[in-house]
Image (cartoon, grey):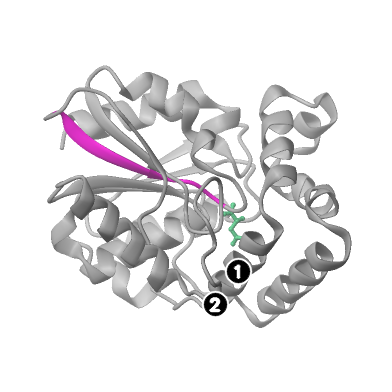
Amino acid sequence: MLPEYTLAGPAGATPILLIHGFPFDRTQWEPQIAALVTDHRVIALDLRGQGRTPAGDGGYLIEFLVDDVIELLDHLELERVCVCGLSMGGYVALRLVDRHPDRVHGLILCDTRAEADSNEGRVARAGAVRTIREHGMAKLAEGLLPKLFPAGELEADTPAVQRIRTLVERADPEGACHALVAMAARLDLSDRLASIDTPCLVVVGSEDTLTPPDDARAMQAQIPGAELVVIEGAGHVSNLSHPEPFNAALLPFLAAL
Ligand code: MLT
């Protein structure tokens, strides 16, 4: 399925593809699109079942989301791109580089991990599906936001918190359930990290409790030549809550590609 997308920046400039987390959409990347658009060809997509891309008939795996990315690259006639994915977007980015290394010429993994869900994680996914079906997205947001942001940020109800609350509450419940099942079924890619043969930047918020800095360090250590940037004070959605240090990490990495 061809996903909905935003395309901005000069034709012919270095292309960067931004893949959002769960259950957000491409608007998660507004601070990066604004910073990148002068010198880069920026593509931000809505994953299947999220944002404006329909869920189709459901029943999909991360593989389908990778196939959708390839369909988009073909549609845009882009042979190779730098791929930047946050959290669920990182799961897609990692599987993309694993299956199609020839289409990726730079990899930015933000607040994500290579391991599959643990047993407890799968049980929690099933619980989240039930919460959505029985009580809707607002109830999911209530439980999710404290995991995405440090307590102080949540209490202050910062613009980033408000933005993410809005994204979660307006997400399509069916699409969110399909995404949860796809994430629960994803492969463990940790033993493939050593074979990644493209420049890689790992970014993580120092306060990210969902995909913590220690996991990011372990991932960086396994990817040959990978760099790591820890965004001080940021939680799980580091690109949105701390756009300045986040962009300051991205720009030199992209410039060096
Ligand atoms: C995300 O932000 O995409 C999610 O936290 C990923 C997950 O639930 O594993």
Q: Which of the two discs, 1 and 2, labels the residue nearer the N terminus?
A: 2
Tell me which amino acid carries mark 1.
His
Q: Residue at point 48% right, 58% down?
A: 48
Q: Cβ–Cβ below 8 Å for labels 1 and 2?
A: yes
Tell me which amino acid carries mark 2.
Gly
Picture layout, residue 82 above or below residue 87: above
Q: Residue at point 82% right, 48% down?
A: 138
Q: Secondary structure at mark 2?
A: loop
Could one spot residue 43 in this view of the protein?
yes
Residue interval drawn in magenta: 13-21
Q: Position of residue 170 (x, y in %)?
A: 71, 43
How many numbered circles does the render carry?
2
Q: Position of residue 205 (x, y in %)?
A: 56, 40
Prevalent SS, magenta region: strand
Q: Secondary structure at mark 1?
A: helix
Question: For residue 257, which numbered disc appears in the image?
Answer: none
Q: What residue would you read off at disc 2?
A: 59
For the residue pair 86 and 24, the one nearer the viewer reads as 24
Q: Quadrant of the C terminus?
A: top left
Residue 160 shown left or right of residue 205 in the figure? right
Cβ(mark 1) to ligand 1 < 8 Å?
no
Q: Position of residue 90 (x, y in %)?
A: 43, 55
Q: Which class describes the residues within 10 Å of circle 2: few (<14), some (14-19), or many (20+)?
A: few
Asked if residue 213 is among those painted magenta in the image, a careful observer would answer no
Q: What residue would you read off at disc 1?
A: 178
Q: Position of residue 35 (x, y in %)?
A: 37, 20
Could one spot residue 200 in this view of the protein?
no
Q: CA distance from mark 1 to mark 2?
A: 6 Å
Asked if residue 20 is among those painted magenta in the image, a careful observer would answer yes
